[in-house]
């Protein structure tokens, strides 16, 4: 399936909030105000994935000094298993490298096997564990990967 990827800003906060709400349980959803605040903060970038001209998912990352962090990544259920998440992660690495980051970090729930596989296949390695990190009480794996420029 053909997909497009584009950086988006504060004007897309409502779109990103809707996508996030469709992908996460209520306790973990970020609303439009949260998205607006994040998108307005220095070093934050959102990359939107679209299929057939419609938003299908996004990745939100923040670059500070020589480090970057994936704040969230989501793909609508109907658009999963098409390689969109993998492509967003690759593009996030490039954006981070272009911003001067050497390492890209993220947290993933120990219960999210699909995401854990995605990150492992993308070359992320375990750096630590955050106990009871998520609202449901699950632990978070802290992962990292070197940033690469295109």
Image: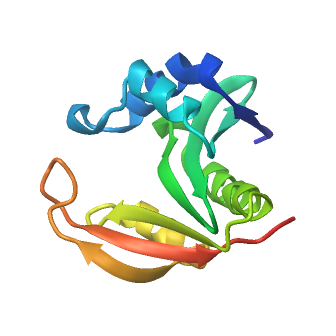
Q: Seen in the image, is 75 located left or right of residue 23?
A: right
Q: Seen in the image, is 78 located left or right of residue 82?
A: left
Query: Residue 135, can we see it?
Result: yes
Residue 145 coordinates in the image, percent (x, y): 59, 76
Residue 96 coordinates in the image, percent (x, y): 69, 59
- Snapshot colouring: rainbow
Q: Residue at x 69, y 30 (%)?
A: 8
Q: Residue at x 74, y 57 (%)?
A: 99
Say which quarter of the image contains residue 148. Answer: bottom right
Q: Is residue 123 above or below residue 59?
A: below
Say which quarter of the image contains residue 123. Answer: bottom right
Q: Residue at x 37, y 23 (%)?
A: 31
Q: Is residue 19 above or below residue 11?
A: below
Work out whether residue 148 or residue 51 is closer to the camera in this orientation and state it. 148
Residue 87 coordinates in the image, percent (x, y): 70, 55
Q: Seen in the image, is 94 located left or right of residue 143?
A: right
Work out whether residue 142 or residue 66 is closer to the camera in this orientation and state it. 66
Q: Residue at x 64, y 69 (%)?
A: 66
């Amino acid at each position: 399936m053909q997909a497009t990827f584009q950086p988006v800003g504060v004007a897309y906060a409502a779109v990103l909030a809707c996508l996030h709400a469709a992908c996460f349980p209520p306790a973990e959803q970020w609303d439009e105000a949260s998205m607006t605040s994040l998108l307005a903060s220095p070093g934050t970038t959102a990359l939107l994935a679209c299929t057939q001209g419609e938003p299908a998912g996004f990745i939100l990352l923040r670059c500070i000094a020589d480090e970057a962090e994936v704040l969230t990544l989501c793909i609508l259920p109907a658009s999963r298993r098409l390689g969109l998440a993998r492509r967003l992660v690759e593009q996030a690495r490039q954006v981070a490298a272009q911003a001067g980051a050497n390492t890209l970090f993220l947290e993933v729930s120990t219960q999210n096997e699909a995401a854990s596989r995605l990150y492992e296949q993308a070359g992320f390695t375990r750096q630590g564990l955050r106990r009871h990190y998520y609202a449901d009480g699950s632990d978070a794996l802290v992962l990292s990967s070197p940033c690469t420029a295109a």
